[in-house]
Image: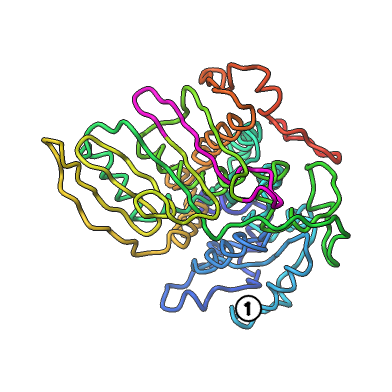
Amino acid sequence: MPGRRKFLYDSSRIAAASVLLPAFSNKIFAAGQKTIAASDQINIGAIGINGMGWSDTKAALKVPGVNLVALCDVDKNVIDKRLGEASALNFDASKVKTYTDYRKLLENKDIDAVIIGTPDHWHCLQMVEACRAGKHVYVEKPIGNSIAECNAMVAAQKKYNRVVQVGQWQRSQQHFRDAIAFVHSGKLGNIRTAKVWCYQGWMKPMEVQPDSAPPAGVDYKSWLGPAPTKPFNASRFHFNFRWFWDYAGGLMTDWGVHLLDYALFGMQADVPKTVMALGGKFAYPDLAQETPDTLTTLYEFDKFNLVWDHAMGIDNGQYGRDHGIAFVGNNATLVLDRGGWEIIEEKNSKDKIPSMPKVKPSESGLNKHMENFASVIRSGKMEELTAPIQVGADVAIVAQMGNIAFRSGKRLAWDKQKGKFTDEAVNKTYFAKEYYNGYKIPEL
C-alpha cells in the first residue's frame, strides 16, 4: 500500500526500510504475534527519559514492530542508567545511538517518530521541530507551558501533517470511556456540577537548597533552554521542576490535564465563560515551591459549573478518593478515577437510579495509548487518534486559565471568538511566556 507507507516514511528512506535492522527490537514483547513487515517497522527516538518519558518508551516497545534506535537526555547519568537496563529489557545497548542535543537526534534519518518526555517548558519547541523534521510525535502532557504555546503546537501539526499523540493515556483506557458513555446516556439526569479533585499525600516539594554547580554529566544550559537563566538549584531540577512557573504549572497542569480532560469530555464542553481561583502555599510554606500546594478553581459554563480542587500532602479527597471526577446529576452521581467508576444513588430523586458497585479497569491505558499511536502512524487515519493535539490543547488551555486566574487574583472572562481573555492586561502578562537564551516561540 504505497500511500500508507508514504505516510510513514519519506521517499528517501523507503529503499532503506527493508535492510535496516532495529537497534532495540521488542520481539520479547511480541511473542506469539504475527511478523511485522520491514515496511511497517516504526523506529523511535526518545527525548527526555528520566521519568514518564521512559515509561512511555517502554510502553511503545510492547507494540509489535516498534523499535528504539536513539535516546536523548541532557543528563548523561540518566542515559547511562537507561542503557544499564539493557539486559533486563533484552536489547543491545551498543546499537542504540545516544544524544544530549535533541536537534542532533532529529537529524537522524532512521527515526520515524519521537517520544518527548522533557519538562513542560521544552514541549512546544521540541514538538514543532520534530514535526518540521518529518517525525511523528508522542508528546507528554501538558502539551504547552502557556496558551500561546498550545496554539503554536496545534498550528504545527496542521502545517506538517504529522501524527501527534498527547500523553493523556486515559483517553485510551476502556473503563474511562465506558464511564463517559454512561454520562452521555442521560441516565444521571441534569448535571449541574462537575467536580474534579487531586489530593496527593506523597507529593512534597524539596527543602530549600543553596545554589550549586550542576551535577557532573548535566548540560544545565540545555536543560534551561528557553527559560530564564538562573543558577543551578537541586530543588528545581528533575521531578521538582513541576513546582516552578518558569518550567511548569504545578498540580493544575500536572494532574489537572488528565482529570479536567475527562470532565470536559463528559460534559461535552470546551472553554468556560469565566474562571476564578483561590489558593496558596498553605501546606508547605517553607519548602521550595512557587505553584500553590492548595488551590480551588471555579469554571463557569453555560449550563453547569466545574470545580477543580487540589491539595498536596493530603490523601483524603472527596468520596474517599485521592483523585477523581464526579458528575453530579439529579438522578445519581457518577464518580470516576484511575481505579474505576461507580454510581451513587440520589435518594430524593423520583427518577433515581440505584447505586452500582465500582467497575474496575482491566487493561493498561498507557499500553493501549501507544498501540493507538502506532496504528495511526501505519494507517494514516488521523481520525482514529484517541488524544490528538487539539484534545491536548483544549484541556491545557483550560488548566492554564485556572493558573492565570490564581496568579492575577481576578475573576476572568474568556472571549471564545478571539481566543483570549477580555482583560488585555492579563493577556499581556500571562498569555505567552517570554523566551530567553536566543530561543523564540515558533511562528507558523
Tell me where the magenta segment starts and ends, as one range: 284-306
Taking the spot 36% from the left edge, 54% from the top edge, the residue there is: 320
In the figure, 428 relative to 174: above or below?
above
Taking the spot 30% from the left edge, 50% from the top edge, the residue there is: 178
The quarter in which the C terminus is drawn is top right
Taking the spot 54% from the left edge, 54% from the top edge, the residue there is: 5
- Residue 418, by quadrant, is top right
How many marks on residues?
A: 1
Specify whether residue 302 is painted magenta. yes
Magenta-colored segment: predominant secondary structure: loop
Instruction: Give the residue type at disc 1.
Output: Phe
Residue 218 position within the rendered picture, expressed as x and y whole percent measured from the top left: 82, 62
Pointer 1: residues within 10 angstroms few (<14), some, or many (20+)? many
Specify whether residue 310 is painted magenta. no
Q: Is residue 114 in view from this perspective?
A: no
- Residue 438, by quadrant, is top right
Residue 56 position within the rendered picture, expressed as x and y whole percent measured from the top left: 56, 61
Residue position marked by numbered label 1 in the rendering: 91
In the figure, 170 relative to 24: above or below?
above
Residue 180 position within the rendered picture, expressed as x and y whole percent measured from the top left: 32, 45
Residue reaching furthest to the bottom? 87
Q: Is residue 3 in view from this perspective?
A: yes
> Helix, strand or loop at disc 1?
loop
Question: Position of 126 compared to 396: left or right?
Answer: right
